[in-house]
Image (cartoon, rainbow, N blue to C red):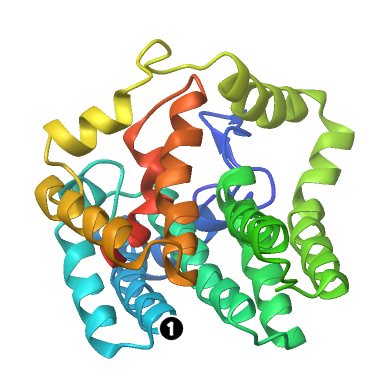
């Protein structure tokens, strides 16, 4: 992008690059173009995103439990997730930290909605940030809608409570789809290779066939409990037991179970498994 000023159709060695959407690459390229080509400038967006991710985790912990202490300790807990920094994480120039920041901010708005704040502002915020998330790392940007819809179904079926505004939700989702479509649709129309790579290779085959650790169903649990690479497993296990025994099916625990535990189960079922796929769940484990 910086060398040939081709910002709309990124290339590598002259060949179109459709493997990942360009939004975060745009941000990094702007920094490099403005301040020069150094390792620091390539990674500064990730570093800032990582710092803001810690702050966002604190805010979600606070709004879930109405406790400043929970927010503060959740921030300390996520700092302890070693691989979140060093394996495709905060210290590296990848898309993951930025999209996880967007997801965590969005879950803050999801929590506000599920706790009763049905203002259109919350739904619009989710739509805009989710759209940017899709433009950063494909469909994982829609992760907050999985939390919102799953929680809605649980509270509707188990407790007979309708905790979301359907019309506002549809508006939000429409925005989340419209924003990335401004980039994807023209590329898909004029280049069939874009659809093959961005949709078939990066999404469909990754979900249905898998590229990494296809036969290792317990991949994530082993990473969490034997490699000590994320939240310290002893702390996480004790916290989970306290939540299960003491608080049971409280509102906050349902949200954390969907966000953290159910996410790991779902990604364990998908036959392509890499540690950073479950990074969106790390703030939930930090809060637990």
Q: Is residue 28 in view?
A: no
Q: Would residue 61 appear left or right of 186 to someone viewing this image?
A: left
Which residue: 12% across, 50% down? 232
Q: Residue 123 appears in which quarter of the rendering?
A: bottom right
How many numbered markers are drawn?
A: 1
Residue 13, x across and y down, in percent: 51, 28
Residue 229, x across and y down, in percent: 16, 42
Which residue: 59% across, 72% down? 110
In the rendered image, the residue lying farthest to the top is 215
Which residue: 37% across, 60% down? 284
Out of 135 and 150, give the one closest to the viewer. Answer: 150
Q: Would residue 53 appear left or right of 127 to someone viewing this image?
A: left
Q: Residue 157 appears in which quarter of the rendering?
A: bottom right
Residue 273, x across and y down, in percent: 41, 26
The residue carrying mark 1 is 63
Out of 161 and 60, give the one closest to the viewer. Answer: 161
114 vs 159: above or below = below
184 vs 113: above or below = above
Q: Secondary structure at mark 1?
A: helix
**Which quadrant is the C terminus positioned in?**
bottom left
Category of crowding for the residue at label 1, using alpha-carbon neighbours closer than 10 angstroms: few (below 14), some (14–19), many (at least 20): some
Residue 77, x across and y down, in percent: 18, 65
Which residue: 33% across, 63% down? 36
Q: Would residue 167 appear left or right of 59 to someone viewing this image?
A: right
Out of 188 and 96, give the one closest to the viewer. Answer: 96
Q: Is residue 153 in view?
A: yes
């Amino acid at each position: 992008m910086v060398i040939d000023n081709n910002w709309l159709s990124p290339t590598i060695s002259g060949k179109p690059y459709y493997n990942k959407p360009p939004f975060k690459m745009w941000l990094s390229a702007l920094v490099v173009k403005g301040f020069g080509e150094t390792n620091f400038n390539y990674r500064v967006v990730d570093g800032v995103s990582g710092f803001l991710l810690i702050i966002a985790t604190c805010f979600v912990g606070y709004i879930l439990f109405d406790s400043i202490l929970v927010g503060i300790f959740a921030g300390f807990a996520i700092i302890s997730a070693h691989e979140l920094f060093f394996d495709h994480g905060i210290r590296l120039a990848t898309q993951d930290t930025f999209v996880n920041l967007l997801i965590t901010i969005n879950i803050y708005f999801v929590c506000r909605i599920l706790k009763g704040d049905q203002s259109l502002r919350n739904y619009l915020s989710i739509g805009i940030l989710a759209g940017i998330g899709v433009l950063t790392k494909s469909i994982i940007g829609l992760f907050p809608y999985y939390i919102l819809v799953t929680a809605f179904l649980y509270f509707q079926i188990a407790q007979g409570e309708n905790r979301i505004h359907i019309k506002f939700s549809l508006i939000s989702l429409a925005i989340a789809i419209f924003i990335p479509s401004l980039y994807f649709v023209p590329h898909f129309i004029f280049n069939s290779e874009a659809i093959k790579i961005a949709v078939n290779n990066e999404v469909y085959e990754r979900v249905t066939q898998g590229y990494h650790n296809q036969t290792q169903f317990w991949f994530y649990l082993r990473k969490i409990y034997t490699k000590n690479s994320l939240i310290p497993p002893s702390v996480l296990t004790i916290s989970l037991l306290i939540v299960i025994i003491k608080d049971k099916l409280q509102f906050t625990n349902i949200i954390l179970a969907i966000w953290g535990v159910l996410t790991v189960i779902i990604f364990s079922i998908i036959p392509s498994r890499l540690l950073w796929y479950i990074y969106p769940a790390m703030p939930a484990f930090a809060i637990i």
